[in-house]
Amino acid sequence: DAGVIQSPRHEVTEMGQEVTLRCKPISGHNSLFWYRQTMMRGLELLIYFNNNVPIDDSGMPEDRFSAKMPNASFSTLKIQPSEPRDSAVYFCASSPKGVLRVEQYFGPGTRLTVT
Amino acid sequence: AQSVTQLDSHVSVSEGTPVLLRCNYSSSYSPSLFWYVQHPNKGLQLLLKYTSAATLVKGINGFEAEFKKSETSFHLTKPSAHMSDAAEYFCVVSDLNTGFQKLVFGTGTRLLVSP
């Protein structure tokens, strides 16, 4: 199994530009999560999808952030316009179908730097 | 709300000596608990999980953790540290009050291993 795949691994952009982060979950998993990790705030859950439907987006910082999951094998997290304070590592994670209390499998992350 | 407290921000050990990373949890019901490891510039990898089965849980790379309800603890141990164990370790509890498998992360413990 290839695991959760994220692209790009590194992104450097200028303030005001649009940034799109991509995630391919593990095949057969029906839940997908986007996290942000910073030194100051640690790991924060941004949004959770179940069966491609956004269930909880209460962690999305503001309207500049949006996420989509058009099908079971692809999700995007978009920031428009980007700001320096958005600099962080963004992780995507997926978990399998079934009973609650299952673990999440994380991708390698995208390190975003906004100058 | 469910939460975890990692009692040490840094732990330093010598190679070949035992490792103890401490974690206390707070939960209003029988929790699911996890330990994840994050090596520098990498994603999070699941070490082990507790989901109300055996209280002593064995994970990968020789790590294990014991669930102690009376002490509300879930400490991570390893008999003999290896240089490759140097990483950040996160204790995690699941929060089902949100209606889905939301993971609540501790602040992390950085394990330093010296030769």
Image (cartoon, coloured by chain):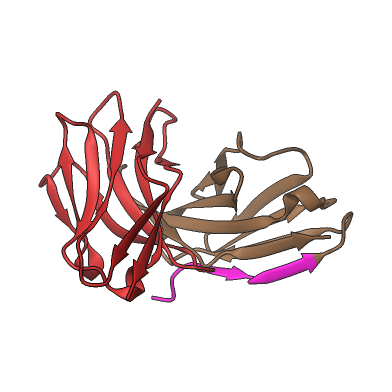
Does the magenta-highlighted stretch encompass residue B45?
no
> What quarter of the picture does the C terminus of chain A occupy?
bottom right
B40 lies left or right of B59: right
Residue at 18% across, 31% down:
B71
Report x, y in % for residue A37: 58, 52
Report x, y in % for residue B36: 36, 56
A49 lies left or right of A18: left
In the rendered image, the vertical position of residue B69 relative to residue A111, given as above or below: above
Task: Locate residue B2: give its quadrant.
Answer: top left
Can I make out residue A102 in this image? no
In the rendered image, the vertical position of residue A87 relative to residue B79, given as above or below: above
**What residue range appears in magenta?**
A1-12
Residue at 32% across, 76% down:
B115
- Residue pushed farthest right? A16
Out of A72 and A32, give the one closest to the viewer: A32
A95 lies left or right of A83: left
| Chain whose colour in the figure is red | B
Residue at 63% across, 70% down:
A7
Residue at 82% across, 53% down:
A82
Out of B112 and A6, give the one closest to the viewer: B112
Does the magenta-highlighted stretch encompass residue A10?
yes
Report x, y in % for residue A87: 72, 55
A8 lies left or right of B45: right
> What quarter of the picture does the N terminus of chain A occupy?
bottom left
Colour of chain A as rendered:
brown
